[in-house]
Image: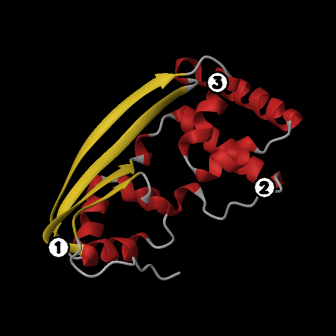
Amino acid sequence: ADVHLPFRDGTFDLVVLCDSLAYLSNPARSLEEARRVLRPAGRIALAVRWRSLDTAAQDVFFRLLDRVGEEHPIVVPQQRDSRGLLGEPPVIREVLSQAGFRGPWTTSLVSGDRSGSAADWLDFMAWTGPRPYALISTLAPGQRRRLEAQLDREMRRLGDEGFRHHHAYTFAGAVAG
């Protein structure tokens, strides 16, 4: 789908996209449209998940979630890795440059925690994106119990790394060119 914001060229001083760029139908075109609606020297600010910093436990979760998605009647078309590179600092700087922005910069924030159980883990991980939320929130109780049991087995194999997660974000910005 073509992206078109209902604003005139040069309308805004600032455009902010927080944890949404990877979920848009056409991220590159969306950035071009953001640039169009910015005034000369207007700025864009982004927060994008830095997925390559996911933990081993997060990798296990998404692998199991892919299996759930194959068996579940809910179809969420976007796979996790289809836009996963956007949070890599050199990638987002290049994408901003290609969209016509000047002086792209990045900085990072990484924090994390550890959940105490498979049930807590699922409750937390359901909020990591539209696909996990759609799949986890619509599981029947028996399906959820089976997923929790699978997660528990896999996390025990990870030892101290089980149920650990990172919140890793790249913050980026640039000036309209």
Asked if the residue at tag 1 contacts the one at tag 3, i.e. Cβ–Cβ closer than 8 Å, the answer is: no
Q: Position of residue 4 (x, y in %)?
A: 42, 80
* Viewer-proximal residue among 153 and 86: 86
Dot 3 corresponds to which residue?
A: 120
The answer to whether residue 109 is left or right of residue 104 is: right
Secondary structure at badge 2 equals helix
Dot 2 corresponds to which residue?
A: 70
Dot 1 corresponds to which residue?
A: 39
| Amino acid at circle 2 | Glu
The residue mark sitting in front, 1 or 2, is: 1
The answer to whether residue 173 is left or right of residue 61 is: left
Q: Position of residue 80 (x, y in %)?
A: 57, 55
Q: Is residue 36 above or below residue 132?
A: below
Secondary structure at badge 3 equals helix
Q: Is residue 65 above or below residue 22?
A: above
Q: Position of residue 61 (x, y in %)?
A: 63, 38
Q: Is residue 106 visible?
A: yes
Say which residue appears at 83% left-offset and 56% top-offset: 73
Q: Is residue 31 above or below residue 162?
A: below
